[in-house]
Image (cartoon, rainbow, N blue to C red):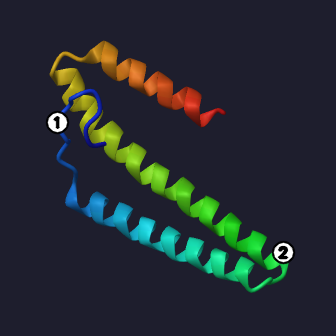
């Protein structure tokens, strides 16, 4: 997404973009709530439950982003003749996801 290595920003499906932004707002709200819980010395188990919710929300956000990338950025890159670059990026993403 966005500029990397001088690439122009990709045009995203508006619905997917709105979904991604909505998920980020949800995550931001949860993070703020977790911070407040820590500041208020709330019960650790309750805080951990909130962190798990954030982790699940991040997983869903990543899924939205990856689906968008695979359905638009990857085909566009291949049409532009950047097959090897696209494959390298996908391999890097795969390796990052396994760490």
Residue 8 is labelled as 1
Q: Is residue 6 left or right of residue 16?
A: left
Name the one closer to the observer, 67 or 94: 94
The residue carrying mark 2 is 44
Where residue 41 appears, as percent x and y from the top left, is 80, 83
Provide the secondary structure element on which disc 1 rests: loop
Quadrant that contains the C terminus: top right
Q: Which mark is residue 70?
A: none
In the shown orientation, is residue 20 left or right of residue 33?
left
Q: Residue 17 in the image: state x and y as whole percent.
A: 28, 59
Q: Residue furthest front?
A: 39
Tell me where residue 48 sits by quadrant. Answer: bottom right
**Quadrant of image for the N terminus:** top left
Residue 13: image x %, image y %? 22, 54
Q: Measuring 49% from the left and 25% from the top, which residue is drawn there?
A: 92
Where, by quadrant of the figure, is residue 10 drawn? top left
Q: Earlier in the sequence, mark 1 or mark 2?
A: 1
């Amino acid at each position: 997404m966005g500029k990397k290595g001088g690439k122009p920003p990709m045009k995203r499906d508006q619905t997917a973009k709105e979904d991604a932004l909505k998920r980020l707002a949800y995550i931001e709200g949860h993070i703020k709530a977790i911070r407040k819980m820590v500041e208020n010395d709330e019960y650790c188990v309750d805080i951990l439950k909130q962190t798990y919710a954030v982790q699940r929300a991040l997983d869903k956000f990543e899924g939205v982003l990856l689906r968008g990338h695979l359905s638009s950025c990857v085909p566009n890159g291949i049409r532009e003749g950047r097959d090897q670059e696209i494959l390298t990026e996908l391999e890097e993403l795969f390796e990052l996801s396994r760490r």
